[in-house]
Amino acid sequence: MTEVKIVQVSEKDLPELIAISRETFADTFGKDNSPEDMAKFLDENYNEDKLGGEMATPGSFFSTLSQVLSMILGNFILK
């Protein structure tokens, strides 16, 4: 069985967090939105300023789920 870890995200992980956030949101909601609307939403909500600012908010906890020696599986945010 592959080990899965929950890892707290730091500022250095921001590019990976943005990438997985954009991918999972688009996979989930892309079929219900036009490509233009999806691109606009992703650009406005999953960028360094937005997620970096949320990450800096006291009490926020950004994490990823990852397989050891593999890839990020998903993410979650506790506020």
Image (cartoon, helix red, strand yellow):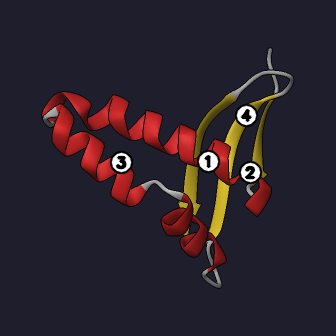
Q: In front: 52, or 5?
A: 52
Residue 40 point in image, percent of width and height: 26, 49
Question: Mark 4 against mark 3, which lies toward the viewer?
Answer: 3
Answer whether labels 4 and 1 touch (C-beta < 8 Å).
no
Residue type at mark 4 is: Ser
* Labels 2 and 3 touching (C-beta < 8 A): no
Q: Tell me if 39 is positioned left or right of 75 in this view.
A: left
Q: Nearer the viewer, mark 4 or mark 1?
A: 1
Measured Cα–Cα span from mark 4 to mark 3: 22 Å
| Residue 17 tag number | 1
**Gap in angstroms between the C-alphas marked 2 and 3:** 18 Å
Furthest residue toward right: 69
Q: Residue 66 carries which label?
A: 4
Q: How far apart are the two marked residues, 3 and 1, measured between alpha carbons?
A: 13 Å
What residue did someone put label 2 on? Answer: 13
Which of the image's four quarters has the N terminus? top right
Q: Do the residues labelled 2 and 1 touch (CB within 8 Å)?
A: yes
Q: Earlier in the sequence, mark 3 or mark 1?
A: 1
At which x and y percent is residue 32?
Answer: 14, 34
**Residue at (86%, 22%) from the top-left corner?**
69
In the rendered image, the residue lying farthest to the top is 1
**Which mark is nearer the camera, 3 or 1?**
3
